[in-house]
Amino acid sequence: MHRPYLSHARAPWSATLLLCLLAGCGNDPLAPFQPEVSNAPDNFSLQATGVTSVSTTLNYSWQNSGTRATINHSSTTTAGSTLLVIKDAAGTTVYSKALSPSLNEPTTAGTAGTWSIQLTLTNYSGTLNFLAQKL
C-alpha cells in the first residue's frame, strides 16, 4: 500500500517539525525584546533591553578552552529576580549569582571544554547584559 504522506519528499518538513518541537520554536519569551546572544568559543554574551514580566530558564552550551572565565555583569533589574549558573565541562558549578548592575569577577577553576550557562528569570523586568570570557 502506497502512503504518500510518508514519502521521502516530506522528510525535510518532518525533520523541521521535530526540531521545532524539541527546541520550542516560537516559545522564546525573550523574543519580543530582541535579545542579542553571541556564542563564540571563549566568548559568550547575552543582552536584551526593555524586558517586562518574564519568567523562564535559558540554557546554552559554551566552549571554553580555559579552566576559568571572567563574568562581567551590566544588568538593571526593575522587578523580579535573576540567577546565572555556570557549570564546567565536568558539570561542576563554577559560578552562581544574581545579575547585578556592575560586577566583574572570575569563576572558580573548572574543567575546560563545553560549559553550560543557565540564566533563570523570575517575573523579571529590566535590561539583561552579561559577558563570559575565558580567563
Image: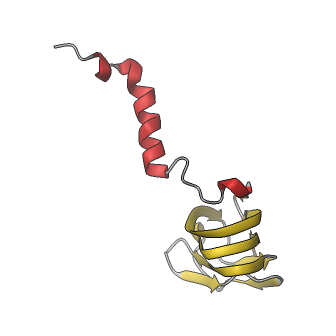
Q: Nearer the viewer, residue 124 or 134?
A: 124
Q: Nearer the viewer, residue 56 or 100?
A: 56
Q: Quadrant of the N terminus?
A: top left
The structure residue drawn at horizontal position 39% and vertical position 26%, both measured from the top left corner, is 11
The structure residue drawn at horizontal position 61% and vertical position 84%, both measured from the top left corner, is 96
Image quadrant of residue 125?
bottom right
Q: Quadrant of the C terminus?
A: bottom right
Q: What is the number of callouts on the image?
A: 0
Q: Nearer the viewer, residue 60 or 77?
A: 77
In this picture, residue 13 sits left or right of residue 66: left
The structure residue drawn at horizontal position 29% and vertical position 16%, both measured from the top left corner, is 4
The structure residue drawn at horizontal position 31% and vertical position 21%, both measured from the top left corner, is 5
Q: Please identify the residue farthest to the top as the structure is shown.
A: 2
Q: Vertically, is 37 above or below 56?
A: above
Where is residue 58 drawn, in percent x and y? 58, 65
Where is residue 10 drawn, in percent x and y? 39, 23
Q: Vertically, is 105 above or below 60?
A: below
In this picture, residue 23 sits left or right of residue 86: left
Q: Looking at the image, what colour scheme do you see?
A: secondary structure
Image quadrant of residue 15?
top left
Where is residue 6 drawn, in percent x and y? 29, 23
